[in-house]
Amino acid sequence: MAYEINGKTFEHDEEGYLTDLNEWNEDLAAIIAKDEEIDMTDEHWEVVNFLREYYNEYQIAPAVRVLVKAIKKKFGKEKGSNKYLYELFPYGPAKQACKIAGLPKPTGCI
Amino acid sequence: MPKATFQTPELGEFVDIPDIQEGATAKLKPLPASPDHQKALGFPGELVDDWEQKAVAKLGELLGKYRSLAVYLDACVKCGACTDKCHYFLGTGDPKNMPVARQDLLRQVYRKYFTVAGKIVPGLVGAKSMTKEVLDDWYIYFHQCSQCRRCSVFCPYGIDTAEISMAAREIMDHIGMGQKYCNEIIGKVHKIGNNLGLPGPALLDTLEGLEEDVEEETGVSVKFPVDVKGAEILLVTPSADFFAEPHVDGLIGYAKVFHQAGVSWTVSSYASEAANFSMFIGSYDQMFKAANRIRKAALDLGVKRLVFGECGHAWRVAYSFLNTLAGPWDFLDPKYPAPQHICEFTNDLIERGGLSLDASANDDMTLTIHDSCNIARASRMGSRPGGQFHIPRAVLKASANRFVEMNPDTTHEKTFCCGGGGGILTDDMLELRVKGAMPRMQALNQVMKKDGVTHMVALCAICKSQFSKVMPFYGIGMDAVVSLHQLVGNAIKLGTKE
């Protein structure tokens, strides 16, 4: 199970989450997003980049609320909502955006 | 994520008993645990040699340990009372999702190796050897049971299918056939302290953010303390309360209640999880380990009371097993139940006039309540029978004006599972989750249409996540599920009482 870019392979798990998050790059993110049927816009990239920054600091993806707050700060009040994040990532910002950002899948009662 | 490839059941005027569809869900099996997930719990990494004998030996060990298991395997008279009581059967039509058929998957092996008739005339008593085919059926159908125990309410002998499915999962873990979702999560609890794998610094950052939010919204400095030594109360809550929506709103509600009560409280970064998924896999050893993190945190922090947040199976483990797993709790204040549910705490305060609640704050919603199975059927709350039903409703009615009950065949002890309990709340089981939610969706849809209900209250982290995910399949918005303490949090008038 691997993604492929120009002959180079990147291992992923059964659900498409990257095995080694250090291998992540923007081309790879674009390929994962395509599998998820998502056209990446500036807002999508903003979410993905924020997730990676947060993960680097805390070794976990941010709570949905934390993410909403960060997006609100960046793009204004009308985009700072859970609903807006679901418009960007219909399968849920936590899981789908994490996958595109190359982060492990959040687990638990979520 | 690819688009759904299955048909969402239609919601009728009532829940019809479906036509039998053999093998309808035979393809729905959860991802297996990786060797790493298995080994972290001390289970073999993959299917062991001689697994047939080892499975039978493990069953023998469990029969010796749990008298109840032997009784459940012996007592069934095939009366059929349970057959149409399982939400997964009602949602899928697969006959192996009839509780009796699910039990029989284990019972056939039990008869073959542990009963005289099964040894002599196996064909006459439905006894079967432990084969790969049987094992595969176990893996599939014991992971299509959410251990909600609704069937046991209707069984004249009280046979508990949940306990049978827990035993089967325990056997499978011991021969190297674990399930990824549960076992990965249990590993995280042992290593990091919660299901999410949320490390201490992230917990602190999240809770600081909540303090800012609440202060910004209300002008009152409501604290969300972490690891505070000497606090009176240790709050143990599902880690989803720190992460997901609408769970977080419930957590804000607890904090506001504690603030108003004027008691000191804290969460622990070491025991930052109420859930105990070890129950789902029937593992006493794992359950013991997770439960004792709570004991250690309570002792280290020197707290006097233990309060649990909104979580279904956590409350079963807490209410029913915590004393044997991690007791005695003689170092806690004997004036209070150990543990106590947050609903009891809030309700006591309401009854004593300690909270000012403005129920009109929730007038934008007409509410109904979903009884979570592990609270409804596997525990109690407060000091009176039925407290697990009355207390959450009392809290709800004090916090909101518009409340409607769903069909009584789907509430209280007859409540339907949300469809995601028992270790099934995972993306790889989405089809089963959507179909299994059908009976609850039917009852909800009915009160939405008839009585104008807009929101459903849940008091379990799994129920909340499951409903947010599956309701859109039925044309209901994902935000139609709310936390009970979210309503309390909305209604509470901070700073009005000293």
Image (cartoon, helix red, strand yellow):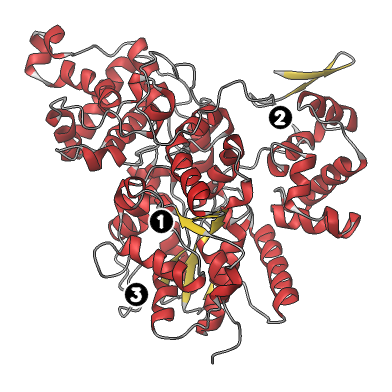
In this view, the residue in front, B261 or B86, is B86
Indicate the secondary structure of the residue bearing disc 3: loop
In this view, the residue in front, B396 or B72, is B396
How crowded pointer 2 is (Cα within 10 Å; few <14, some 14-19, many 20+) is rated as some
Q: Nearer the viewer, mark 1 or mark 2?
A: 1
Q: Please, which chain is the residue tagged with disc 1 on? A: B
Q: Name the disc covering residue B331, or none.
A: 3
Q: Please, which chain is the residue tagged with disc 2 on? A: A
Indicate the quadrant where residue A22 lies.
Answer: top right
How crowded pointer 1 is (Cα within 10 Å; few <14, some 14-19, many 20+) is rated as some
Circle 1: residue type: Glu
Indicate the quadrant where residue A42 lies.
Answer: top right
Question: Label 1 to label 3, Cα distance in Å?
Answer: 41 Å
Q: Nearer the viewer, mark 1 or mark 3?
A: 1
In this view, the residue in front, B300 or B351, is B351
Residues marked 2 and 3 touching at CB (< 8 Å): no
- Where does label 2 land, which residue? A19
**Horizontal and vertical percent position of residue B423:** 46, 38
Residue B298 in sight: no
In this view, the residue in front, B71 or B429, is B429
Residue B188 as seen in the image, left or right of residue B83:
right
Circle 3: residue type: Phe
Indicate the secondary structure of the residue bearing disc 2: loop
Q: Residue at x 78, y 51 (%)?
A: A54
**Horizontal and vertical percent position of residue B72:** 18, 34
**Above-or-below relation of B419 to B198:** above
Q: Name the disc covering residue B405, or none.
A: 1
Residues marked 1 and 3 touching at CB (< 8 Å): no
Indicate the secondary structure of the residue bearing disc 1: loop
Quadrant showing the C terminus of chain B: bottom right
